[in-house]
Amino acid sequence: MKTENDSRQTILEGIGASPGICIGKAYLVDKEGVDVIKKYYISDDQLDNEKNRFKSAVKKAKDELHQIIEDIPDDLRENADILETHVVLLKDKMLYGRAIKTIEQDRVNAEWALKKVVAGLKKKFNRLPDPFFRERVADIAHVSDRILRSLAGVDKVKIKDIDKRVILVAEDLSPAETSQIQLEKIKGIVTDAGGVASHTGIIARTLEIPALLGLENATSVIQGDDLIIVDGTEGKLILSPTEQTLLEYEERIHEYEIQKAFLNRESHVSAKTKDGVVIKVMGNIELPEEVVSVKTYGGDGIGLYRTEFQYLARNNFPSEFELFDKYRDVVEVMAPQPVTIRTLDINGDKAVSYTTSHDETNPALGLRAIRYCLKKPDIFKTQLKAILRAAAFGNVRILFPMISCYDEVIEAKRMLDVAAQALEDEDRPYRRDIEIGIMMEVPSAVIIADILAKEVDFFSIGTNDLIQYSLAIDRVNRQVAHLYNPLHPSIIRMVKRVSDVAKENNIKVFMCGEMAAHPIHVPILLGLSIDELSMNPQSIPAVKSMIRSLDTKSSASFIDEVMEQKTSEDVMELTQRKYAKILAENVYFH
Ligand code: PEP
Ligand code: MG
């Protein structure tokens, strides 16, 4: 936090989870009533009573959730799934069952038992490296918060009852709360907790309202009715802005709206460079429902479908039919455009409550993604069958994550044959002649790219992990976030190697990591001849617009200069200098 020249104006920095700017009064969503949990012991004859008190609190919480689900407006219907998940979680063995057991065994009050169970679960989930799984801690916290509230008889502020235009400021917002947001009332969202992958971020992006998450101390610094500016694009909050700052941001809102409207209008046309090369700009999705955003923002297909989201917050593995049903929906909506379905990328079975658990000291380097799938052939085969069946309904590509050696590719392809044979035996319609690709996100795969290229139809560069594994920077550790840089000369060299090898072997090369989502990286990616870029849907219009302002020949010669730079700062400076005018026209929207 830093204070500018005016003594009251304060700038807070957080994670910009949904772009855009809003100015308004803060509305603090209070959490009173459940913060202080007292422990007390219960006697044997109070035991049944205490268990029943817990059970009725769960029931009340469940009824409330059902009511919220019923009241969800149509345009947010897709988020009902998250709340259904919470209903399931209320009765989940790991939460409900363990809490009852703790009341029995420790002879403690229901609140304390629940607190103990939740603390244990949080610890376990927080050890997982993938931000998605760690975000699931938030689901557990929301559900337990709701039960605690009904145990204490406290009612939380109902967001749907807010009757003025405000910016919500909260420690955290549950999906139940976020889904009550009415666009005509809520201008923006600010939370202490959360990150880009949280449900709050996902919903804010769907609603297209600015969101700034992970501020850590917003609820203690900001008071109700304080005037604030939320800049979800730059990840900044300005508390008590000066007159001059206000004017400046009003102007920026105006420019932002004009540019957004302009880019969106253009976005449905394909992105062709000045010298006529068409670059496909695709969307990344986590949930099948997000396919709508890809369409809205003019995506040329799905470059990355992260399928792991369908395996979470449930009590068992999804069946082949459940998976097939969701994949088919996405494939049919996008047809004839391609849908790149990435096979399960979870970090070992710990992430999924219904499998056996093995603790890993270093989960990012553990039994993740393809390693997990090859160890669990039945789970893998079920997913592969579902993908091959969905492939009969449109244009499907399959993508294997976290490949680090040759054998994994061979084994994954063999499993695909096994799945196809099973479908053949069952006499089910399917399609086997789909393109097969691998994620290039582990440095060893980049080094042996020439060996791997002979086995696949395309490479997809996952810069999120490639940076993590190459620069030795935990992608979810805020302490080292400043070192996490896609323009590091080593990363540019690796992307170049993957692309060069792909061209030599006549296969395609895509990028689906976050690096692809930033207009400033586009001249470099064009220069490195990446065939397709895939990103969060909202970034598609700006990236397409950037592509239209460039030409491949000058980008190619620009790369020669880029390759001479010694640091990421040098690369950034060079890019900014060389493309100053074009960037000024394009980066604003992102
Ligand atoms: C990546 O690693 O760049 C990637 C796209 O995959 P994920 O973010 O799902 O790990
Ligand atoms: Mg990855």
Image (cartoon, grey):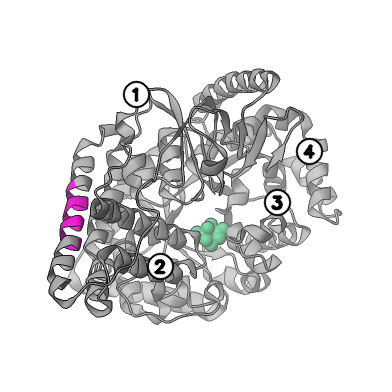
Specify which label sits upstream in the sequence, 3 or 2: 2
Picture quarter with the C terminus: top right
Q: Ligand 1 within 8 A of label 2's CB?
A: no
Q: Residues within 10 Å of mark 4 (few under 14, many from 20)?
A: some
Q: Amino acid at mark 2?
A: Ala
Q: Amino acid at mark 4?
A: Gln
Specify which label sits upstream in the sequence, 2 or 4: 2
Q: Quadrant of residue 155?
A: top left
Secondary structure found at label 1: loop
Residue 119, label in figure = 2
Q: Ligand 1 within 8 A of label 3's CB?
A: no
Q: Residues within 10 Å of mark 1 (few under 14, many from 20)?
A: few
Tell me where the magenta segment starts and ends, as one range.
Answer: 54-63
Q: Which residue is mark 3?
A: 528
Specify which label sits upstream in the sequence, 1 or 3: 1
Residue 83 percent across, percent down from the top left = 27, 49
Q: Amino acid at mark 1?
A: Asp
Q: Are circles 3 and 4 on residues that touch, CB within 8 Å?
A: no
Residue 288 percent across, percent down from the top left = 34, 49
Q: Majority secondary structure of the magenta segment? A: helix
Which residue is depicted at the point 70% across and 19% down? 244
